[in-house]
Image (tube, coloured by chain):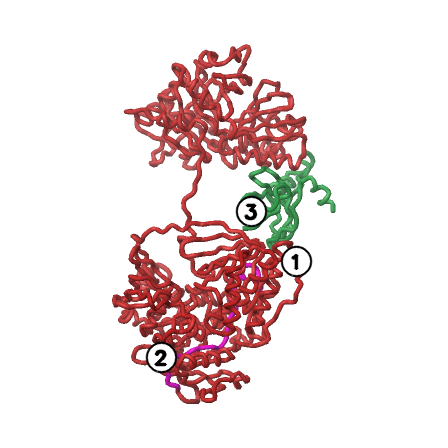
């Protein structure tokens, strides 16, 4: 079982976490077309590689960001969601 | 023939403790410290089993936990028969009754021997090609009757196999020279070390080759005296999982160990030579003979031939002669002995030997070895010392890629993932001092990694320099019976045929030929199989990867995998009160909830109907503590709820509640509840029982994205809640509280805080099951006080989930996830009134715009059955289909016989054209009868 370094609780086993998929920006609901909206709703990138994802440490209800390489099943970084804007821009 | 020698120095057996046992109905005697196989070998039994496919006689071959042809059905004195016990490693016990598996009529006269005569008609892949199609079941029965190994005894005693968790800084797998050295150097660096070995004793190959045994004994005693090292012998590291999680299997226990670093000192597995009749009893690996000799004082035969391609073969010859065993010849496959023949001058040595066939004697065991173009050597044992394969199964599971080293003719680990280290023979290092040095280096590296997590290696990885493995010890024979895989009776021609049929990669060949798919999982066959395949393709092992070796490394009894049942369920605060009222419980979202309360002499239906009537006529009390209960605080609390729920909550007045409907981004109904505003920046709301945990998590995720100024507390377990429902409840409850319950002071959908029955409480005016009702939320610990007080009032009756379902149905209320599903939007569920589309944003709003444009594809409608239909016994169930013009036009989502109305009422998802009140509909009942019903307006019951 993998160990995930929770930014709040330290290293914990995978069992204590749930994943909510990649960090994605929703299109502006007031200006986007129906096609853009449905693409956002139903399409996901399944190409293996480095993904930036939402993970939750369920006992503490803490959501944070995990960057992992899904091709190599390797966690590259974990950090608080507050850092998302700074990291995503980097 | 094998036989027991006089005492051998360091033998594991205790000659003062003889053990009597039975084999195939005959009496035998071994000693404490024997395994089943060794005790039989000591008595001269050469044939211990029959092969899987051809039922050929088989004896000891590896004596290292992969003698797949020495599997036994073993009954102990105290327990019923256990199938497929591995005789080479299972300790003998007094009174054992042992039988060979896979025979018809016993080992000696196995009637399935005839199958070998059919072998020419059973080429590889025959089963796939012959047995399919319409007649398959008939063939399957036939084949099953004669195949398979041990038989499961249904009356075998149950054995408890507990699991435990373990932790260590450094886990060392294998307690041979390199593993012992690694454990010591890691412990010296301050690491807590766990050292495991599948053998009964530590020492590794030194304990059977006798080489450098003094140094190894010293290491063993230093390990025993080191407080930082725990040594577990008789423990198999069966699987390696992500982030250094390792399953350790002992006979009666599994330990899941999390290690800071892992050192694989797993050694190497000796590989056989392939030639005709290399499977005869008496043909065995050199290391097997040494294990028999040093551990159990058993001679492999009276006159032994050694087939070799390395120094180890000559050392074996000297070893045997030192124990007064006659060595007929040392037969070197190589053109020259490489200067490794340093034995006594009278040793009969030959080089450039090609084994042609082993010849069986009248007892089925080997009596001679015929060489091509040379003499035939008379012998009663052929020992093979022609090379090794690294025991790399666990390394592969850890993610290591094994690379073939042409200089060593062995696979060695390539780059290892972080935290994993390999030491000793698995690295291709065969000389004792070098292995100890490798172990010391890797132990220190592992300790440094475990303590500091450093990545860069400080020392260069050691590499072996001496080739001990023959590159191709395979000598096919025109008449076959040259076995590559003894588990599955795979011969050279089978592999060549696989390649010819197009299954010409290691993975495909494995599956077509079943090479390596037997109990030993190819430990003595995968390497040669790959060699044969690659040679047939004019390529080398460097050009391919071996098949992936997955957990488990050795077969693990299922008892270790099947755990004790652990299905926790939750009890509410007044569970004992429900028990006292003889509740019939049902499981809802992990909770045990009263379905209804049993009354002596009354049927289930009567009980439920009586509960419904109590609520309609006076007052009922239901435990609704299982609802999710969340509080939200902060400046943005109202704005956040506006974005989450379909309704508007920032404009909700303090002291009032409003229905909240939660959608997902696709506009699908996910959850609902009641949202109460307790103060300007403080709301309290409920979720469905099953949605409690998910909704809370979902809200946290949304706010992790939006980062609004609000915070959440999940108080689901902190508070109990009870719904007091019915026309008589206002008067009744007023007696317990100073909260003014009058209509003017406490209107419908109001919320008040105060004391009820002396308990601090939040009271919500609710209308889910009846027009008048109070939902009372109290701290968990106060719940019994409140329950007892309310139940003591005259006319209050407890009601359960089943009555609640009937009551809310009479009121026409839909239940999320019962009356809606993963395709239902709020307009289709009749919940459009709860959606404020004019808000700037809420989750699901964008999709609802599309849904609105497209129009509803279904509608949730109320229906009732005509009274005469009920009288005729028609029974409608949930999920029954609506039928219209021969097609499906919807389905029933809720249905109940209403005691209040005296009719069968229900909700159904129906095609829009059937949704108008008064429309006749047809429902197909579970028994196939068509039942007519009529769409009606909801609620079915206005008052009450």
Viewer-side residue, B101 vs B320 = B320
Residue B362 percent location from the top left of the image: 29, 80
Q: Residue at x 34, y 76 (%)?
A: B3
- Badge 1 marks a residue whose secondary structure is loop
Residue B937 in view in this figure:
no
Residue B733 percent location from the top left of the image: 46, 14
Q: Which residues are magenta?
A: B377-401
Residue B509 percent location from the top left of the image: 48, 68
Viewer-side residue, B601 vs B784 = B784
CA neighbours of label 1 inside 10 A, class few (<14), some (14 to 19), many (20+): few
- Badge 2 marks a residue whose secondary structure is strand
Image quadrant where residue B415 sits: bottom right
Q: Of callouts 2 and 1, which one flags the residue occurring earlier in the amino acid sequence?
A: 2
Question: Which residue is identified by label 2?
Answer: B366
Cα gap from disc 2 to disc 3, whole angstroms: 55 Å
Residue A18 in view in this figure:
yes
Question: Which residue is identified by label 1?
Answer: B455
Pointer 2 indicates a residue of which chain?
A: B
Q: Which chain is green?
A: A
Viewer-side residue, B346 vs B255 = B346
Cα gap from disc 3 to disc 1, whole angstroms: 23 Å
Taking B245 as reference, is B517 above or below it? below
Looking at the figure, which quarter contains the N terminus of chain B? bottom left
Q: Chain B appears in which tint? A: red
CA neighbours of label 2 inside 10 A, class few (<14), some (14 to 19), many (20+): many
- Badge 3 marks a residue whose secondary structure is helix
Looking at the figure, which quarter contains the C terminus of chain B? top left
Image quadrant where residue A60 sits: top right
B397 inside magenta stretch: yes
Pointer 1 indicates a residue of which chain?
A: B
């Amino acid at each position: 079982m993998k160990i995930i370094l929770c930014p709040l609780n330290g290293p914990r086993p995978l069992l204590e976490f749930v994943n909510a998929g990649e960090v994605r920006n929703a299109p502006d609901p007031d200006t986007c077309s129906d096609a853009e909206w449905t693409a956002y709703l139903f399409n996901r990138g399944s190409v293996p590689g480095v993904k930036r994802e939402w993970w939750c440490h369920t006992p503490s209800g803490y959501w944070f960001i995990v960057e992992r390489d899904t091709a190599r099943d390797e966690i590259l970084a974990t950090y608080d969601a507050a850092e998302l804007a700074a990291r995503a821009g980097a | 023939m094998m036989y027991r020698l006089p005492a051998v120095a360091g033998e594991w057996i205790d000659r003062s403790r003889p053990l009597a046992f039975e084999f195939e109905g005959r009496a035998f005697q071994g000693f404490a410290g024997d395994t089943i196989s060794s005790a039989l070998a000591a008595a001269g039994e050469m044939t211990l089993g029959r092969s899987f496919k051809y039922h050929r006689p088989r004896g000891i071959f590896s004596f290292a936990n992969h003698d797949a042809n020495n599997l036994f059905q073993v009954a102990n004195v105290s327990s019923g028969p256990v199938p497929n016990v591995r005789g080479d490693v299972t300790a003998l016990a007094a009174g054992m009754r042992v039988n060979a598996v896979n025979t018809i009529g016993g080992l000696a006269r196995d009637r399935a021997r005839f199958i070998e005569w059919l072998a020419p008609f059973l080429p590889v892949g025959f089963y796939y090609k012959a047995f399919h199609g319409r007649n398959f079941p008939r063939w399957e029965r036939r084949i099953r009757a004669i195949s398979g190994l041990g038989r499961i005894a249904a009356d075998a005693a149950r054995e408890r196999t507990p699991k435990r968790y373990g932790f260590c800084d450094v886990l060392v797998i294998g307690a041979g020279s390199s593993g012992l050295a690694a454990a010591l150097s890691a412990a010296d660096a301050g690491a807590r070390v766990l050292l495991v070995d599948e053998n009964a004793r530590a020492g590794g190959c030194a304990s059977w080759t006798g080489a450098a045994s003094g140094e190894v004994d010293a290491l063993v005693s230093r390990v025993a005296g080191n407080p930082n090292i725990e040594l577990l012998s008789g423990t198999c590291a069966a699987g390696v999982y992500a982030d250094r999680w390792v399953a350790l299997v002992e006979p009666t226990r599994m330990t899941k160990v999390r290690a800071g670093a892992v050192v694989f000192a797993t050694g190497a597995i000796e590989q056989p030579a392939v030639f005709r009749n290399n499977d005869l009893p008496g043909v065995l690996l050199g290391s097997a003979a040494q294990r028999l000799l040093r551990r159990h004082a058993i001679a492999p035969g009276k006159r032994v031939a050694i087939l070799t391609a390395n120094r180890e073969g000559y050392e074996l010859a000297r070893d045997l002669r030192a124990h007064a065993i006659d060595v007929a010849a040392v037969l070197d496959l190589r053109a020259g002995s490489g200067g490794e023949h340093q034995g006594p001058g009278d040793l009969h040595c030959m080089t450039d030997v090609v084994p042609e066939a082993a010849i069986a004697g009248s007892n089925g065991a080997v009596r001679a070895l015929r060489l091509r173009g040379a003499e035939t050597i008379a012998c009663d044992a052929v020992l093979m010392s022609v090379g090794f394969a690294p025991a790399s199964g666990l390394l592969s599971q850890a993610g290591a890629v094994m690379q073939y080293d042409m200089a060593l003719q062995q696979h060695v680990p390539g780059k290892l993932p972080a935290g994993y280290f390999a030491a000793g023979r698995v690295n291709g290092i065969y000389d004792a001092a070098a292995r100890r040095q490798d172990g010391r280096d890797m132990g220190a590296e592992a300790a440094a990694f475990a303590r500091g997590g450093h990545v860069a290696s400080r020392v260069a990885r050691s590499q072996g320099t001496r080739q001990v493995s023959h590159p191709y010890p395979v000598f096919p024979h025109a008449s076959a019976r040259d076995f590559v895989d003894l588990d599955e009776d795979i011969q050279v021609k089978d592999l060549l045929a696989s390649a010819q049929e197009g299954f010409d990669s290691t993975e495909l060949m494995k599956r077509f030929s079943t090479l390596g798919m037997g109990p030993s999982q190819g430990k003595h066959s995968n390497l040669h199989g790959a060699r044969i395949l690659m040679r047939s393709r004019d390529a080398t092992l460097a050009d391919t990867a071996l098949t992936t070796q997955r957990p488990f490394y050795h077969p693990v009894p299922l008892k270790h995998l099947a755990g004790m049942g652990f299905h926790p369920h939750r009890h509410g605060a007044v569970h004992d009160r429900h028990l006292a009222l003889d509740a019939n419980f049902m499981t809802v979202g992990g909770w045990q909830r009263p379905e209804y309360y049993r009354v002596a002499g009354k049927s289930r239906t009567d009980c439920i109907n009586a509960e419904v009537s109590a609520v309609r006529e006076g007052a009922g009390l239901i435990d609704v503590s299982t609802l999710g209960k969340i509080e939200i605080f902060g400046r943005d609390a109202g704005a956040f709820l506006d974005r989450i729920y379909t309704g508007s909550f920032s404009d909700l007045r303090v002291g009032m509640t409003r229905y909240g409907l939660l959608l997902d981004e696709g506009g699908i109904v996910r959850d609902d509840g009641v949202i109460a505003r307790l103060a300007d920046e403080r709301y309290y709301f409920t979720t469905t029982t099953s949605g409690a945990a998910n909704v809370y998590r979902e809200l946290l995720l949304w706010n992790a994205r939006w980062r609004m100024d609000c915070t959440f507390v999940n108080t689901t377990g902190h508070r109990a809640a009870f719904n007091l429902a019915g026309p008589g409840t206002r008067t009744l409850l007023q007696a317990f509280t100073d909260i003014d319950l009058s209509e003017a002071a406490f209107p419908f959908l109001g919320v008040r805080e105060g004391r009820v029955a002396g308990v601090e409480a939040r009271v919500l005016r609710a209308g889910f099951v009846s027009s008048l009702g109070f939902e009372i939320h109290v701290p968990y610990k106060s719940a019994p006080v409140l329950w007892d007080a309310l139940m003591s009032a005259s006319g209050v009756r407890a009601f359960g989930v089943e009555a609640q379902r009937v009551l809310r149905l009479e009121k026409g209320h839909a239940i999320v996830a019962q009356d809606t599903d993963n395709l239902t939007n709020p307009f289709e569920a009749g919940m459009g009134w709860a959606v404020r589309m004019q808000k700037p944003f809420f989750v699901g709003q964008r999709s609802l715009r599309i849904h609105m444009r497209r129009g509803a594809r279904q509608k949730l409608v109320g229906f009732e059955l005509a009274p005469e239909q009920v009288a005729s016994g028609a029974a409608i169930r949930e999920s029954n289909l609506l039928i219209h013009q021969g097609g499906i036009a919807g389905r029933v989502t809720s249905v109940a016989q209403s005691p209040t109305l005296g009719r069968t009422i229900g909700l159904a998802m129906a095609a829009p054209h059937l949704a108008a009140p008064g429309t006749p509909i047809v429902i197909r009942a579970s028994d196939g009868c068509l039942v007519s019903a009529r769409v009606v307006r909801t609620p079915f019951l206005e008052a009450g």
